[in-house]
Image: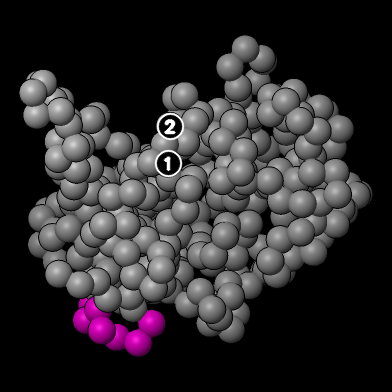
Amino acid sequence: MVASVRVASLHVYPVKSLRGVDVPSVQVEPWGPRGDRRWMVVTHDGTTLTAREHPRMLGVRATPVEGALRLSAPGVPDLLVAEPGDRAPDVAVGLSRLDRATSAGPEADTWLSGALERPVRLVWLDDPTRRPVSLAHGGRPGDPLTLADAGPLLVTTEASMAALNRWIADRALESADPTGSPQPPAPLPMERFRPSLVVSGDLEAFAEDRWATLRAGDVELRFAEQCDRCVLTTVDLDALVTGKEPIRTLARHRRADGKVWFGIRMVPTTTGEVRVGDLVEVVEADGAARAGRVAFGS
């Protein structure tokens, strides 16, 4: 890997399905970035709420604070929520491989219910070792996970995002009125895909499909699986409404096994710090035909 390949950006999402924050550096723990997805929004019967069904959730920003969480939404004062103590009550939750989490308390519940305009509760995962990465998602025995869907980290590349935006622009021009002066759409932001780590540099688009082991900063990461994408990526982060892109265009170019794919999930094999600007090295790569890899036609 050439020296021009580096960490372009780092992102942490303290609350599952709420808006996250860009950070200049992150401590990577066995279960992923420190402070990432330790919190979750549920209904009063414990059902997990996600932005797939409730796009309004992406209008609330969650920022990690030492020992706490800051929630922000338009038109209301921020709320600082402390991590629950040992005496905080547990509540039943409906999430794969996890049946209980700790209540954040009535103040947080009231604030979030107002911001989301529906009755909800905020809960916290006290110990990520309680929830493993599923073997079906590339986990190995002992791999821990927070409240993320399937993997500790999502890695994407600027090269792949640029290719996708070119495809979207080309498709828009194909369907435009030839008698007018068609303008390409504004590029979609990488934030739509909720990556943990974005890589930039001299890379082919979708080179990450073949990465097996990656080193960034002090940390080594192991490939778990390619990431299938859902309707959450179609939510306009300003208007908080769903559209057709990028799923429509991914379905043309990145469809396999009945799904569309962008980015890879990875598992830390060492812990430490990663900083924006750190060199990135592909320690090991293998072919797309490897068992467990999705292959795409030309």
Q: Position of residue 205 (x, y in %)?
A: 17, 58
> In the image, which residues are magenta?
284-292
Left or right placement of residue 297 versus residue 128 in this view: left
Look at the image and tell me in which quarter the N terminus lies. bottom left
User: In this view of the protein, which residue sits in the foreground, 122 or 250?
Assistant: 250
Judging from the image, what secondary structure is the residue with disc 1 in? Answer: helix
Q: Identify the residue at image location x=41%, y=36%.
A: 243
Furthest residue toward bottom: 291
Inspect the image, locate mark 2, and give the three-letter code of the amino acid beneath it.
Asp
| Magenta stretch: dominant secondary structure | loop
Q: Quadrant of the C terminus?
A: bottom left
Q: Position of residue 208 (x, y in %)?
A: 26, 65
Q: Residue at 75%, 41% (x, y): give it.
A: 122
Q: Is residue 124 visible?
A: no
Q: Which residue is mark 1?
A: 234
Disc 2 packing (10 Å; few <14; some 14–19; many ≥20): some
Q: In the image, which disc is placed on residue 280?
A: none
Which x, y percent locates residue 296? 24, 71
> Which residue in the protein does label 2 denote?
236
97 relative to 86, above or below: below
Marks 2 and 1 sit apart, C-alpha to C-alpha, by 6 Å
Q: Residues within 10 Å of mark 1 (few under 14, many from 20)?
A: many
